[in-house]
Amino acid sequence: MIPFVRELAFKYGRPDRVSPLIRRVIAQNPGPFTFTGTGAHVVGHGEVAIVDPGPDDPRQVEAILKATRGERITHIFVTHNHLDHSPAARPLAERTGAVIYSGTTYCRPSGGGDRLEAGDDLAFRPDVALSDGQTFRGPGWTVEAVATPGHTSNHYAFALLEENALFPGDCVMGWSTSVVSPPDGDMGLYMRSLERIRARRYDALFPAHGPPIRRVDSFLAAYIVHRRQREKQILLALETGGPATVRQLAARLYADTDERLHPAACHSVLAHLLDLYRRGVIDLAGEIGMRGLWRPLFMRHAA
């Protein structure tokens, strides 16, 4: 079982100190995919950086400006261009003169009837595209860009070196598992990103949604095991229940899950299926995607 962390004391618009160098301001965009809302993290004192400023909401921009009154925002780091993370970056930069940093703008947008609530911010453009290992400095703080593709192809996390802490964006969330949504999301890359984060032995994770994660290694170990178990469940469902579409598999595997999350479940199931298919573990009849009929490899020549 994943040791989720869901207890969170906060007030919208109020900056809460979560470590000596980090303050958090939560946006007013609660929902089934965002928990209480997107947490914008303020790094440092005097000259500060913002990680994931949040949605297109003037209240969030004003709350961040109020939280940093008397200081100067120099850097804005965006983990990925989803509508709950990146839209506030540009208006905040225009008000402060800060430079926006993120991964490449290219992504293959999700769509169709299973489009997720937190969709793609296709208008987002950073001022500077990141490269893995790139570092940035301010008074008393150093931030390293850590490539963590999988949730999206251009996802980056940001390490605060002075505290051996990581802002994992949506790669890791304390309150829930993360959605991996093809075609831009990739389960194989996502699993490698989780392993990479775990190998770096951070002391704390500060996700964009939910409370900080302090017991990092045990949490990530359970996070990884959960995904591997889900993979085994999908294989078992195909072997025992026969060929199935993504929606049929999701209905079997997520029968006890809030129906509002079923579209996300379909995307994660598809991501697992695509990874298994590329690894030669399962086969497919029909088109790659939600409508295809997925089946165990040994059924390739059946019927």
Image: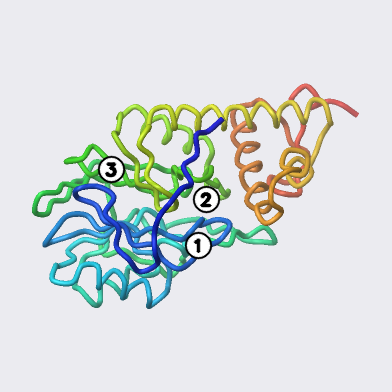
Label 3 close to label 2 by CB (< 8 Å): no
Label 1 close to label 2 by CB (< 8 Å): yes
Image height check: is 64 above or below 19?
below
The residue furthest left is 139
Secondary structure category for the residue under label 2: loop
Question: Measured from the top left, where is residue 99 in percent x and y?
Answer: 22, 65
| Cα gap from disc 1 to disc 2, whole angstroms | 10 Å
User: Could you tell me if residue 31 is visible in this image?
Assistant: yes
Name the residue carrying label 3.
132
Looking at marks 3 and 1 on the same chain, the residue that comes earlier in the sequence is marked by: 1
Image height check: is 187 above or below 154?
above
Name the residue carrying label 2.
184
Q: In this view, does 160 lie to the left or right of 156?
A: left
Question: Measured from the top left, where is residue 149 in percent x and y?
Answer: 42, 43
Question: Looking at the picture, which amino acid does disc 2 mark?
Answer: Asp
| Cα gap from disc 3 to disc 2, whole angstroms | 19 Å
Name the residue carrying label 1.
120
Quadrant including the C terminus? top right
